[in-house]
Each structure stands twice: as structure tokens, then as C-alpha cells.
Amino acid sequence: MILLGNFNSVVASSDRVSGNLDPTSCQLCTLLSDWGLNEPSSPHLTTFTYHHPSDSKHKSQIDHIYMNILSDSYYCYTSPVSFSDHYAMTLNKKNTQDKGPRPWRFPVSILSDSIKQQSIKDRLALFNEHNPIYS
């Protein structure tokens, strides 16, 4: 069984910047225990998967992948995406040649697409407006 998604709940205080647990945390932990589910190892999961769009201090790990089949044979990592306030999560099967996630490469086709260029400019302006520390 594989259970994955945005659970809007954390299972450990380290999953949230504030360290706060909520009432659903206990319910989620009970469900995972009852179903025998574990998270795969996550050597590449070094970031929170949710970043509040207007509060840079509000971050949490609320998106999860749980498994009951050889979970230590898999690993997951996150990647930011421009279309969501959540990071994308990828589940990969481990192998002896594993070197981690492939490097991201800039899609060069964007440079010749004026609509995509304007969209990127608009998103960067919005990001800089909400995150002045990066401006």
C-alpha cells in the first residue's frame, strides 16, 4: 500500500517551523501505526514542503508519502514548483548507483516565448513583493 498526499498535519514537531503539533497529528500517527505505514528514507528531503505565500516564517512538512512495502528500498526528495505553494515530491527506488536527484536544467524554450517571459516576470515581481529579503 502507498498512501500519499497533503495531510495538513505533521507527525513530529520538527515537521513545522513553530514546532507545534495539532490535534490531527495524533490521529495521523494512529492511522499510520494501524496500517503499518512508514515514510521512505529521505536523504534528499531537506526542505519543508509547504511555504505560506504571505508569511515566510510559516513552513511545514505536511505532504507525505507513506508505504508498507520495503520502504527502505525507496527514497523521496522535494522540488519547488512555480504553480503551487507546496513542493513537488518524488519517490524513487534506490539502487547501488544512486547519486540523488538529477540536476534541474533551465528550459531554453522559455527564452523565445513572450507569454512565458511575462508570466515569469509577473511571478518574480509577486515573489519579491512578499519576500523583500530576496529582492
Image (tube, rainbow, N blue to C red):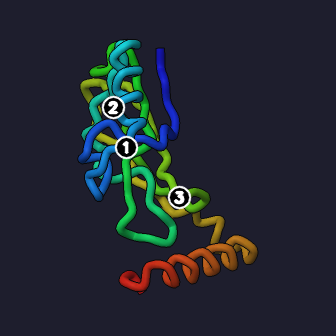
Give the CA separation, mark 3 to mark 1: 21 Å
Compared across the picture, whether 61 is left or right of 17 comes to right
- Given residues 52 and 83, the one toward you in this image is 52
The residue furthest right is: 115
What is the number of the mark on residue 85? 3
Secondary structure category for the residue under label 3? loop
Between disc 3 and disc 1, whose residue precedes?
Answer: 1
Residue drawn at x 27%, y 40% as measured from the top left: 12
On the image, the x and y values in percent for residue 101 come to 36, 44
On the image, the x and y values in percent for residue 51 come to 44, 60
In the picture, residue 64 is in which quadrant?
A: top left
Q: Callout 1, which amino acid?
A: Asp
Q: Nearer the viewer, mark 1 or mark 2?
A: 1
Q: Residues within 10 Å of mark 2 (few under 14, many from 20)?
A: many
Can you identify the residue that label 2 sits on?
75
Asked if residue 63 can be seen in this view, the reply is yes
Residue drawn at x 32%, y 27% as measured from the top left: 40
- Given residues 14 and 22, the one toward you in this image is 22
Q: Callout 2, which amino acid?
A: Tyr
Compared across the picture, whether 91 is left or right of 117 comes to left
Secondary structure category for the residue under label 2? strand
Between disc 1 and disc 2, whose residue precedes?
Answer: 1
Can you identify the residue that label 1 sits on?
22
Give the CA separation, mark 1 to mark 2: 27 Å
* Vertical order, 126 against 56 (above or below): below
On the image, the x and y values in percent for residue 83 come to 61, 59
Q: Which image quarter holds the C terminus?
A: bottom left
Q: Nearer the viewer, mark 3 or mark 1?
A: 1
Residue drawn at x 27%, y 21% as measured from the top left: 72
